[in-house]
Amino acid sequence: MWEKVKKLFAPSDMTVGTPWKKIVAFMIPMLIGNIAQQMYNTVDSIVVGRYVGDNALAAVGSAGPIFQLLLVLFAGIAVGAGIMVSQYFGAKARDELSETIGCCITLTILASLALMILSPFIVRPLLELLDTPASIIDWCDSYLMILMIGIGGLAFYNILSGILRGMGDSVSALLYLLIATVMNIVLDIFFVKDLQMGVSGVALATVIAQTFSGILCLIRLMKMRDIFDLKLRYLRPKKKYCFSLIRLGIPSGLTQMILSMAMIVVQSLTNSFGEQFIAANVIVMRVDGFAMMPNFSFGTTMTTYAGQNVGARKYDRVYQGARQGTLIAMATSATITGLILIFGRQLMGIFTDTVSLVDLSRRMMGILAVGYIAMAVTQCLQGTMRGAGDSMTPMWISIITTIVIRIPVAYGIAFLTRTPELPNGRQECVFISLLVSWVMGAVISTIFYRLGGWKKKALEM
């Protein structure tokens, strides 16, 4: 029995075995973990919506894009780390793996300190720049400031769990996340319902829970001495590894920044439709998060799978796995999307008792439905390219679909549908533009994957 447990938590070598079986076995803990991660945001929204009110729900949602923008540096480090760890693990390069992990830890500490210092000077101005309604701006401000104070814990969990996944250990990351999710739910209810702390209580619960899970990830890494070394000398970053981490991570970080800035620009349009539409947008995005979970899980899985096989120079397995993984992802996404559409009204009703808000949210969710299958293609193929070391191509695709397509489509529809009754245009513009960008992203990603330029981006060992 103990041997089976040890095998379950052992890193997975994805360079051998049937590709789709390896992909699915790695993806399932990833999917459960991503669902648990989404529970953080969802429970936050349910608790504030139920115990504080619809305006508090809108405040948490309005703060989201700004929080994502402030996290772009960590997103870059995490992606770069995942690519490097998976390739060095696949190549069985122990010293390079140790240097990479040490570099990641040091850069995360420095980035956390920098963001903690800067956040008091930038959070409120960003909220004001977005014309955040006066009725919720103070709640947004307090929510974001608490998250920024605890940013180190949030960052370390995401980066260290990414390192674990890069070595094929998705089960440990899942276990720690489930522990943190339970903590978050309990603390949410305690802080908001019992202590009446409002949105500040929700933020504090998230910080405590993710900091705890980050500590568990660090302990797990310290016990993996048979794979790499976590010694003080490896915490002194070397130029080679820092450069590779930045080269691989900056495009992904910039991608996240672009997406976050686009969300902020569109959030300004969303805010123009009033508090009820803001609250509806929050509800849709929470449900959307669950619909996207299979896609994100397959995307991260394909990054690890491709990284290990590129590190081992097994390109035939990369192609085979990308094809099989994409087909399974599309089928999975179609099934979950269908369930969300069938039970959409019940799902929206979890967040609020306001009938008009439930109806509005359900109608907006219906617009996005087909897009989830397109996103399955995008995530799998871009994940494969990133795993091979090509993080630039996904960045440019994101720029095109977000800046060139989504924002003009959103504001264009809003402008063309203005009437005396609808001075800001039709609300549907926000979600139609998102659907269009998703579909175009799948088309462009398929073209660049087939061109094959990503095969030339593997790290030099």
Image (cartoon, rainbow, N blue to C red):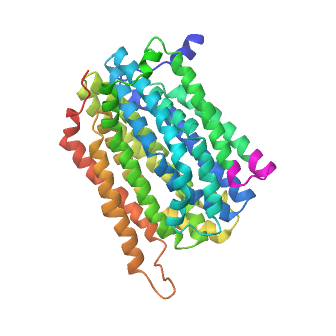
Q: Is residue 317 left or right of residue 292?
A: left
Give the total number of marks visible in the rendering: 0
Q: Relative to the observer, which residue lies in front, 251 or 357? A: 251
> From the image, which quarter does the N terminus lie in?
top right
Residue at 51% of width from left, 16% of height from top?
7
Judge whether residue 194 is colored magenta: yes
Q: Residue 43 at what x, y percent from top left?
A: 65, 49
Pinpoint residue 358: horizontal percent, then vertical percent: 62, 66
Q: Quadrant of the C terminus?
A: top left
- Image: 98 above or below 189: above
User: Is residue 340 shown to the viewer in this render?
Assistant: no
Q: Residue at x 64, y 32 (%)?
A: 179
**Viewer-side residue, 350 vs 72:** 72
Compared with 76, 375 (above or below) is below
Is residue 388 something one can see in this rendering? yes
What range is drawn magenta here? 190-201
Whether residue 161 is in magenta: the answer is no
Q: Residue at 60% across / 49% down in the picture?
A: 41
Q: Position of residue 137 (x, y in %)?
A: 61, 63
Tell me the chief SS of the magenta region: helix
**Image side of residue 164 versus residue 146, left or right:** left
Nearer-the-camera pick, 169 or 25: 169
Give the residue drawn at x 72%, y 42%. 187
In this view, which residue lies farthest toward the right? 194
Front position in the image: 51 or 59: 59
